[in-house]
Image (cartoon, rainbow, N blue to C red):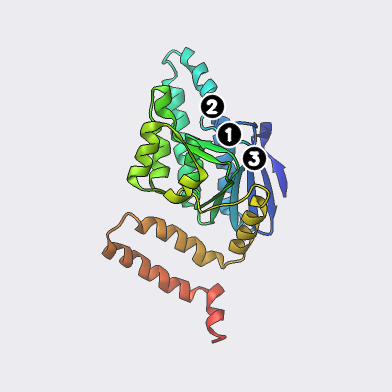
């Protein structure tokens, strides 16, 4: 399957259980209201499609994603409410899309070649895994424009430590791939020419896993991160029992 959404916003390619969602509107791949809707629609359909086992999000080129479309926001300043209704809808829609990205049962991978900034970095952090080239960089630049990257920091703060995300948010500086790797924002740095192959091989490996336990295990892991140790074990233990009773796994025990 190779499809392009209306207006060329998101292209979809399904191969061996791996759905690659490639952001359009190069070079910035901005998260306009329409882009958010197209990406959210693709994620919803992927979540319901048994043929999709893994989702890869790719913003090709020197900019993975530049975040929200500031020109689109600026145009709504001419509205009677100075754009308040528009930005409320924009950020509610973006938050809903990011939540579904993280909470979907299928593994998600960000493939980053260039800069991921503001909501573009939020998109990276909302994925389960992230792989980047040495040329990639990462930024929460809101303070440089008189604001603060508050919603992007929700996802980023769940990927890296408090002081690291606060440094990013307060300085608005761009951080290189080495910093991102040390902070835990990405999993690995891969040479640009090898990145598609490395991500593709990993995604196909994940796609071959038993989907029931993977999906339930992933969702349980995110849920127990915010619980006490006792509550986390209470949540995880019955799920672990279900893993061993899953028909897709149980046959492996019969070989022992």
Q: Badge 2 is on which residue? A: 69
What residue is drawn where x is 64% and y is 51%? 195
Residue count near mark 3 (Cα–Cα under 10 Å), binned few <14, some 14–19, many ≥20: some
**Residue 103 located left or right of residue 52:** left
How far apart in space, not on screen, are marks 2 and 3 (Cα)? 17 Å
Between marks 2 and 3 in the image, the one whose residue lies nearer the viewer: 3
Name which quarter of the figure residue 80 lies in.
top left
Q: Badge 1 is on which residue? A: 35
Q: Is residue 34 above or below residue 229?
A: above
Name which quarter of the figure residue 15 lies in.
bottom right
Q: Earlier in the sequence, mark 3 or mark 1?
A: 1
Q: Is residue 231 visible?
A: yes
Q: Provide residue 123's location: percent of width, then percent of height.
A: 50, 42
Are dots 2 and 3 in contact, CB under 8 Å?
no
Between marks 1 and 2 in the image, the one whose residue lies nearer the viewer: 2
In what quadrant of the picture does the C terminus appear? bottom right
Q: Provide residue 213's location: percent of width, then percent of height.
A: 50, 67
Q: Residue furthest bottom?
A: 256
**Residue 28 located left or right of residue 103:** right
Q: Earlier in the sequence, mark 2 or mark 3?
A: 3
**Secondary structure under the numbered disc 1 in the rendered image:** helix
What residue is drawn where x is 72% and y is 50%? 1
Q: Badge 3 is on which residue? A: 60
Q: Provide residue 6's location: percent of width, then percent of height.
A: 67, 34
Q: Is residue 88 above or below residue 154?
A: above
**Secondary structure under the numbered disc 3 in the rendered image:** loop
**Secondary structure under the numbered disc 2 in the rendered image:** loop
Between marks 3 and 1 in the image, the one whose residue lies nearer the viewer: 3
Residue count near mark 2 (Cα–Cα under 10 Å), binned few <14, some 14–19, many ≥20: some
Q: Earlier in the sequence, mark 1 or mark 2?
A: 1
Name which quarter of the figure residue 60 lies in.
top right
């Amino acid at each position: 399957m190779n499809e392009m959404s209306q207006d060329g916003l998101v292209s979809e390619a399904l191969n061996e259980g791996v759905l690659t969602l490639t952001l359009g509107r190069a070079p910035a791949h901005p998260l306009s209201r329409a882009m958010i809707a197209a990406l959210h629609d693709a994620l919803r359909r992927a979540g319901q499609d048994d043929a999709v086992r893994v989702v890869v999000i790719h913003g090709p080129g020197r900019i993975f994603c530049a975040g929200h479309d500031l020109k689109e926001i600026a145009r709504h300043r001419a509205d009677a409410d100075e754009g308040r209704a528009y930005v409320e809808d924009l950020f509610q829609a973006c938050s809903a899309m990011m939540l579904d990205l993280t909470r979907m049962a299928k593994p998600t991978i960000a493939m980053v070649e260039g800069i991921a900034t503001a909501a573009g970095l939020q998109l990276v952090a909302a994925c389960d895994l992230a792989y980047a080239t040495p040329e990639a960089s990462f930024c929460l630049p809101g303070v440089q424009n008189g604001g603060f990257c508050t919603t992007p920091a929700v996802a980023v703060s769940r990927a890296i430590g408090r002081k690291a995300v606060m440094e990013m948010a307060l300085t608005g500086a761009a951080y290189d791939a080495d910093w991102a790797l040390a902070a835990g924002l990405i999993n690995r740095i891969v040479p640009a020419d090898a990145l598609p192959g490395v991500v593709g091989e990993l995604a196909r490996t994940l796609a071959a896993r038993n989907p029931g336990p993977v999906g339930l295990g992933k969702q349980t892991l995110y849920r127990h991160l915010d619980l006490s140790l006792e509550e986390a074990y209470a949540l995880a233990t019955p799920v672990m029992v279900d893993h061993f009773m899953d028909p897709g796994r149980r046959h492996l025990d019969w070989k022992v």
